[in-house]
Amino acid sequence: MPDASDRRLIDWVDGHPVSRRFGDVYFSRGSGVAETRHVFLDGNNLRERWGRLAPLDQFCVGETGFGTGLNFACAWQLWDIVAPSTARLHFLSLERYPLSAPDIARTLGTWPELATYRDALLRQWGDFAPGWHRLVLANGRVLLTLVIGDVQGVLAQIDAVIDAWFLDGFAPAKNPDMWRPRVLASVARLSRPGGTCATYTVASAVRSALQAGGFAVEKRKGFGQKREMLRGTLVHAQPAPWRAPWLARPSRSHASRRAIVVGAGLAGTAAAASLARRGWSVVIVDRHATLAAEASGNPQGVLYARPSPHGTLLSELVAAGLQHTCRLLPELGLEDGADFAGCGVLQLAYDADEAARQEKLASLGWPCTLLRGLSRAEASARAGVELPVGGLFFPRAGWVRPPAICRSFGALPGIRQVLGREALALDRFDGSWTVADGLGPIASAPVVVIAGAGQSFSFAETRHLPHRLIRGQLTFVPETSASSALRTVLSGDGYVAPAREGRHSLGATHRFRASPTGLTAAEHAENLAKLARLSPALYAAVGGDRLDPTQLEGRAALRCSAPDYLPIVGPMVDAATFASIYAPLARDATLELEARSPWLEGLYVSTAHGSRGLVTAPLAGEILAAYLEDEPAPLPRAVMEAVHPSRFALRALVRRRAASG
Ligand SMILES: Cc1cc2nc3c(=O)[nH]c(=O)nc-3n(C[C@H](O)[C@H](O)[C@H](O)COP(=O)(O)OP(=O)(O)OC[C@H]3O[C@@H](n4cnc5c(N)ncnc54)[C@H](O)[C@@H]3O)c2cc1C
Ligand SMILES: C[S@@+](CC[C@H](N)C(=O)[O-])C[C@H]1O[C@@H](n2cnc3c(N)ncnc32)[C@H](O)[C@@H]1O
């Protein structure tokens, strides 16, 4: 067993990776590629199954143990050869001990024929925090959902239907956790009827657990020295455990892949992009003449989330979202320095509570390339300006120009923009929604996504969703030769970014029940005061005391938040019918009711992204696509439910019970 301070996972023995923790090889010493092809690809009959797919079909592989990514790279290669060019491969893989990029590069580097796949994977590979990671590869033709965590906990949170499993833990005697009956029962539960699994081991405990889950199991010739291997086909699917129908998925109702998205900010353009990547035709409607004219129109936004040390659902969401957006940026064709800068974000420990929170977070053992604590001196050196305190540094974060992201999303093939039209009414007739304004219909499609931030609730269908509007103002201050030393974003109860086009953005104020636009000197003064607390030296460097708040430039807009500060993303229901169908929950919230939720077929929302749209909106696009395409969810079930629009209707019922009791 390696020394605890030594984080290396691999020993290289004769050029082969061997796990130090498990004392086992990642793949056969002879030829890993040939073994993968024999055991997992042929074992699941993938060449033939993928060759039979129709255009735009999808196929989902589940894997226990991502390891070096060799199985993934081989599967992707075969997919490229035999699947239709518009079909989509989902690869959902679980891994407790993710390898470093150099280890993956070295391993996959053994096979020149995998170089394309290795390079594409490595472009998005970094150190991963525990949790869920969605990697969009080959323009969305291949989606990797990599879940970092222990197999048992993770399987319970997967919301997906798997077509073929690669069961690839280390040898059962060395890695029993990966082969426990509970794990294999979950594998069976998540499989499509007729779905398959394959593994190199024929251990009798594995065989019987797979059989108990409903797989018909057969032994086949093993690879190399191994005499036998196993393949299984799910012939007796076990009855699915009860799942709350109000938070389940609507069954897919649309015949064609056409959608209208109302709102061309981060939420709307991200939703459109996720659908367009899946071959949808999308019309984006916005009342302004340009994209990103409201909250998403700020010249600089901070790509930053404050994960909680207590592992809340919000924290899981923002940690996943932050990393997702960071991985997307290089793929969006943005200009480094003009549209974004991965300059890191320094979260200062500005008071005792924040210092305690940071200490806990730093002790969670996240990789130091994702997050590390810095002393005051280290933080000052990193920032390039003198700071009053140290804090937590997030090296991969930085600032982004939100309109650049919206434009990049909005320019994808398949997206048409209808600008300068305000959607005033929705009407559904004969399986199709029509979005109309005073002039008449704007567009019709089977699916509508409302992504209008605070205006999302002006429709009869959405009016019941609770939300609030919070005005925010940014202040722009000219860069000086002294302030140009700032090398990273500073964040505390406000933030300041390194200058873009000669000026720094200082942010941001929060005002409830305030006028949406128009700049106020009082809020400029507030932003300057926040800067003075973040760094008196930087405040002086921009000439803080000499700046006149009545003369400063800035930008104001409205944020939209839900009362629980989570975004609202998912399918809509008819609220009145919901309340009557599920009224018994008001008496007993533990009832396992079966009644199907009264979905408003084809109507979805992505809104209430609050102060974190850069972090949550792109991932929300993937959530919506998962609903609309019946794909694996990009997040754990609990987080999908936490952002579900029906959570409020459910809470209202339960509150009624509390009030009447
Ligand atoms: C001052 C300030 C600073 C911020 N700083 C950060 C930051 O540093 N980091 C971060 O991650 N987030 C930040 N945010 C939050 C972030 O800007 C938002 O979360 C994000 O922009 C929300 O995107 P959205 O698409 O939901 O909303 P918006 O960008 O407001 O877009 C909604 C769009 O819908 C359109 N629309 C609405 N109704 C209709 C209709 N009926 N018909 C047609 N069009 C309609 C609107 O015209 C608008 O274009 C900040 C916000 C503010 C105000
Ligand atoms: C044989 S290797 C997988 C090889 C991999 N499929 C490949 O293509 O390289 C087994 C993997 O399972 C992971 N693992 C072991 N125990 C685990 C657990 N309890 N939960 C999740 N992953 C685990 C190991 O870290 C290792 O990467």
Image: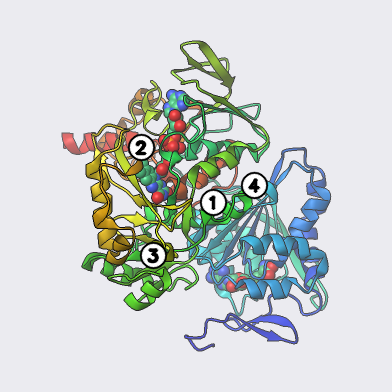
Residue corresponding to mark 4: 192
Helix, strand or loop at disc 2? strand
The tag earlier along the polypeptide, 2 or 4, is 4
| x 35%, y 42%: residue | 554
Query: Is residue 581 depicted above or below 353 in this figure?
Result: above
| x 24%, y 56%: residue | 545
Pointers 2 and 4 in contact (CB under 8 A)? no
Residue corresponding to mark 3: 482
CA gap between label 3 and label 4 equals 62 Å
Q: Nearer the viewer, mark 1 or mark 2?
A: 1
Farthest-out residue, top:
439
Helix, strand or loop at disc 3? loop
Queried on whether the Cβ of the residue with tag 2 lies below 8 angstroms from ligand 1, the answer reads yes
Query: Is residue 274 depicted above or below 261 in this figure?
Result: below
Q: Nearer the viewer, mark 3 or mark 1?
A: 3
- Which quadrant does the C terminus fall into? top left
